Amino acid sequence: MSDTTALLKRAHELFPDEVVTSAHVRHLDLPLGAGKFALITLDNGFDHTKPTTFGPGSLAKLSEALDQVEREAAAGEIAAVGVTGKPFIFAVGADLKGVEVLKEHSDALAIGKGGHDVFKRIAALPVPTFAFYNGAAMGGGVEVGLHCDYRTVSTGVPAFSLPECFLGLVPGWGGCTLLPNLIGPAKAITVIIENSLSQNRQLKGKQVFDLGIADAVFAPADFLEQSLLWAATVLKGETVVERPEIDRGEAWDAAVAHGRAIADSKVHGAAPAPYRALDIIAAAKDATLKDAASLQAGFDAEDAALADLIMGGELRSGIYAFNLVQKRGKRPFGAPDKSLARPVTKVGVVGAGLMASQLALLFARQLKVPVVLTDIDQERVDKGVGYVHGEIDKLQAKGRLNQDGANRLKGLVTGSLDKAAAFGDADFVIEAVFEELGVKQQVFADVEAVVSPTCILATNTSSLSVTEMAAKLEHPERVVGFHFFNPVAVLPLLEIVRGESTDDASLATAFGVAKKLKKTGVLVKDAPAFVVNRILTRFMGEIQTVIDEGTPIDTIEKGVEPLGLPMSPIVLIELVGPAIALHVSETLHGAFPERFTVSENLRRVVAAGKRGFYTWASGQQEIDPEVAALLQVGDVVLTPEQVLDRALTAVAQEIALMLDEGVVAEAQDIDLCLITGAGWPFHLGGITPYLDRSGVSERVNGKPFLAPGIASVPA
């Protein structure tokens, strides 16, 4: 047993609940007479529902396998070594469950060094090494392959990423050092920084090859056979892998500077992880894949960054947020038994505007059932169907659909002015018309008259009462709120609203549809503006009040920077649209006049037809002078710190009231909604642990939102 293996086995004692990944070695005779091949398969013994991860015990198992192949290579018994994964999964990185039990910086440092020590043994083998990325690969799963000499990837790989910065870490087992030296710093920063901070954007197999991470790409049906044949041609000298020369001059520095600009735009300096990763990438300029000493300096920097970040609050916050999305988000709290759900074989969409058209495209793509749009005239219907077909053409142009798939998808989406013909055999009809209660009530009355008794009626309302919307219907029990967030294709949240009469079968069907749409369904009480819009409107209302009182907009922007939000509240008004922001604030003012204000300045902006407070006419973000002329403000000027305190105080108060009202079951649902519906940063771990951590919860409400230990986030 090597020293590395022994150390990792001792470290495994810190992780008693680790699901250990085995590393099985089998020997194959390569084609073309290329010799004996030792193939290491990473497998945790579960089906594809339990991804393969690396904890200390798993690293020890891999180290044991390397003990064996080292001996075989030294004895001349094998010509090469390869690493692959179980079906559908290569490996998805470090086992983050163990992070919560680490109490000492030295233990965290040992975990980083342990991964490096094992992976470096692959690079040090005296025979060529290959990684066969057969399935999902993330974090350490990507990095173990980077230590190999050659890599192949399957076109069926659905997810490939280095997501560490998204969670509050750095790619610390070689990613920051090896990847820029393999594909260049610009491409590496796309993977490590830009994709990670863009809600953990994933690469597909072909993209991995196009970036140069993999040297060959094969179809999934015979991926391993083709990879072994390709490896044989490499060993026989019939295939020579040539990689581009890396520019280590100004281009490297420019790429790092661009990476810092991306990090600034995403987290505004509020999260340390991407900046630590960029520091390591910057230093890797002086390393090469052939220089062990310079690579080791990079690995040492990765170890130090990992240890520091593991012991900091950002990672714990990221893990809490990750667990919300991966666990609570996939098992919705309070959802009825799924056996009650009815089948949905046809969908109707009332309305053919932009939101309705986006919904039609989503339903057709994910449910693969006929979708019919209706509206008040043929021109609108044709425009809505045309939009959907145009988006399908764009998907085909990007290679995400072939011609046959595009034609089938277009065939599913049609339009009609005849609701009876369109919806008579529909199982699920959703309205996406003007946000006015009387209009929506009339729409549902018209639809109820022509649909079957079991058809679900869903509303995409953002703030109106589902109960009132259904009150005049013969069967109000089948009405459910189904609130999407814009852009529909990007934001995962779906607030599923139970009205006072909504029955379990309708609710179960709604949750079943949400799952098929690949959305995160959260059960929400029928309360004004539900969750996300209520919190954001309270937050934005406080910001708007501060503007009206006299604080300059640039001071407000600076005040909220520590939150690292995906966009400033002023820009958010433009994204939502001032008219919609005004409408929601008026709705909430009507429900809670003592807390929700309606800004007269915002009224003026809407009346003037302005789309927001900023203009980009000069190529720079500037206050629109026409908007500035509209504003009537006082002489109360706050500091940035006071702005932030005002906003957080209002949010803490509102969340406490929402929990008291039972709008959602628990504070975790508030966090899940904001993360998946408003892009609340992972590094903050959700709004409630952030408010707990900063002491705002205690000051405003007299107690924290979360019981100690739930978020595992130190102060």
Image (tube, rainbow, N blue to C red):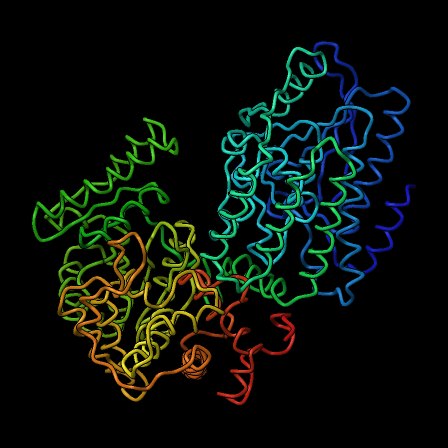
Residue lying at the far front of the rendered structure: 250
> At x 55% / y 24%, what residue is drawn?
218
Q: Quadrant of residue 560?
A: bottom left
> At x 52% / y 77%, what residue is drawn?
691
Q: Front-most of 465 and 316?
A: 316
> At x 27% / y 55%, what residue is drawn?
616
Residue 514 screen position, x and y as percent:
39, 55
Residue 66 screen position, x and y as percent:
82, 35
Residue 354 screen position, x and y as percent:
22, 51
- Residue 526 visible (yes or no): no
- Residue 401 visible (yes or no): yes
Residue 676 screen position, x and y as percent:
44, 60
Q: Quarter of the image containing the N terminus?
A: top right
Q: Quadrant of residue 522?
A: bottom left
329 relative position to 114: left or right = left
The image shows residue 231, relative to residue 182, as above or below, that is above
The image shows residue 123, relative to residue 127, as above or below, that is below
Q: Front-most of 631 and 37?
A: 631
